[in-house]
Every structure is written in structure tokens, then in C-alpha cells.
């Protein structure tokens, strides 16, 4: 699990956790969502980190299906 800190200038305005995720595309990474308040306004926040090159190649998928 990752912690994502959201700052406005140098002040922390939100903290979000991102759990490991296997995306539908086959890629691997992290995903988290939540709500934060900045001043008087509230925001819905999402963070997605996708590992570059983690999606299986088509031939790897075909081999697993045999």
C-alpha cells in the first residue's frame, strides 16, 4: 500500500492510500480514491499508478490460455 500526500503550496491538504491493483487490461499498479477539502470546497480525488511494461504481451496471454 502507498500513501499519497496532496499539498497546496507547502501545506498538506489531503492524504490518500493507494492499494495494489491488477487492472482489467492486465497491467499492474496501484489505485486509490477519496475526498479531501481545500478551503471551503470538497473534492473527489483518484490516483492511479500503472507500472510501465507490466501488461502481458499478446503471446503471453495466448500461452496461459492453452
Image (cartoon, rainbow, N blue to C red):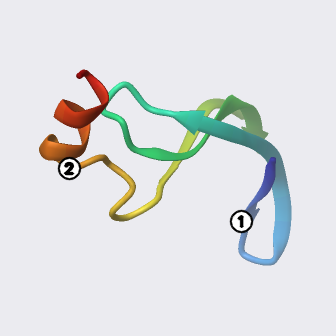
Can you tell which mark lies on residue 8?
1
Ranked by sequence position, the earlier of labels 2 and 1 is 1
Instruction: Return the residue found at the far bottom.
Output: 10
- Report whether 41 appears left or right of 26: right
Neighbour tally class for label 1: few under 14, some 14-19, many 20 plus, Cα within 10 Å: few
Image location (x, y in percent) of residue 20: 67, 41
Above/below status of 15 relative to 19? below
Indicate left or right for 45 with 58 as reference: right
Depth check, front residue: 4 or 58: 58
Marker count (numbered): 2
- The structure residue drawn at horizontal position 71% and vertical position 42%, both measured from the top left corner, is 18
Q: Eyeballing the image, is 4 above or below 9?
A: above
* Residue 32 horizontal/vertical position (percent): 66, 36
Q: Quadrant of residue 39?
A: top right
Question: Are the two marked residues, 2 and 1, in contact with CB atoms closer than 8 angstroms?
Answer: no
Where does the C terminus fall, quadrant-wise? top left
Amino acid at each position: 500500500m502507498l500513501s499519497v500526500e496532496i499539498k497546496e503550496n507547502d501545506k498538506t491538504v489531503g492524504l490518500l492510500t493507494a492499494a495494489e491493483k491488477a487492472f482489467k487490461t492486465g497491467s499492474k499498479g496501484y489505485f486509490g480514491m477519496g475526498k479531501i477539502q481545500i478551503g471551503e470546497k470538497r473534492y473527489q480525488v483518484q490516483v492511479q499508478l500503472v507500472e510501465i511494461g507490466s501488461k502481458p504481451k499478446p503471446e503471453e496471454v495466448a500461452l496461459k490460455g492453452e
